[in-house]
Image (cartoon, rainbow, N blue to C red):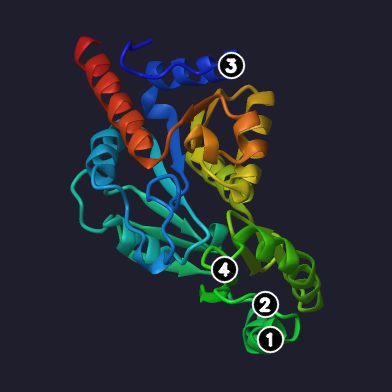
Amino acid sequence: MVSSLPHPTTSAGRDGLAALLARPEKAVVALDFDGTLAEIVPDPERARAHPGAVAALSALAPHVASVAVITGRPAGVAVRYGGFAGVPGLEHLVVLGHYGAERWDAVTGTVRAAAPHPGVASVRAELPGFLDRVGAWPGTWIEEKGRAVAVHTRRATDPQGAFEALRDPLADLAARHGLVLEPGRMVLELRPPGMDKGVALADHVRETGAGCVLYAGDDLGDLPAYGAVEKLRSDGVPGLLVCSAAEAEAVPDLAAQADLTVPGPASVVGLLAGLAEAVERGSQSA
């Protein structure tokens, strides 16, 4: 193992890292966007990939089977905020937006998408009045996400209190419209069922025929992707699970399952850059 790379704390994680370094051309490197490649910010429209992210990804991507960004954002938004379009070395990057309902391929520069769920439009129309009726706290606000809609509590006077007060009512609202509620860090997203980051990741691994996988995420919405990696491991496909968060900010359920925890996007970028250096060194010595 390359000394500059962080060491996974589990044997399964060490096996996953070793497999990636031994056969990078068979590896899928998959990453969440917000909190993993980009810092969490009060206004999601101001989120941007870490300044070193594109360089690290473009150095690593030519050596692996695929790099995939898997996000709840619309694919086109993640591409813009990430600065991924037209970058040499990222020709085969894919962005799986809306938990896989949308796909952007760098090689074509186009987005493919499934038909939208009608419940999203219904919830979008009902949500402002609904929040008024349930007494949403000042500072709570709605984010339009195209194929989903989210309620943020980060700006509320008591963000956690507002989050907890709205969680059950919004779950009921989502269910009435055939949607599901996806909780995150001070955000409650109402979105269509049947698609999550785990489904998107598993489908992409099958499509590429990958022999190992790395997944990095930071929030509850990444748990299905963690589950997909665990399932792949049980089927004999090595994997490495990375949690992006400073120790005090880590989501406990995610951190408990991670093989490796790094303190936020800057360290995720450092990990990607270290992997790129390691596999480049390996290809030169082969």
| Quarter where residue 263 is shown | top left
Three-letter amino acid code of the residue under disc 3: Thr
Disc 2: which residue: 136
* Circle nearer the N terminus (1, 4): 1
Task: Give the residue displayed 53% in from the left and 15% down from the top.
Answer: 15
Three-letter amino acid code of the residue under disc 4: Ala
* Circle nearer the N terminus (3, 2): 3
Task: Give the residue displayed 63% in from the left and 22% down from the top.
Answer: 236
Circle 2: is it few (<14), some (14-19), or many (20+) Cα within 10 Å? some
**Residue 260, how many percent across, how many down?**
51, 25
* Circle nearer the N terminus (1, 3): 3
Gap in angstroms between the C-alphas marked 1 and 4? 14 Å
Task: Give the residue displayed 54% in from the left and 58% down from the top.
Answer: 100
Quarter of the figure with the C terminus? top left
Disc 4: which residue: 156
* Circle nearer the N terminus (4, 3): 3
Three-letter amino acid code of the residue under disc 1: Asp
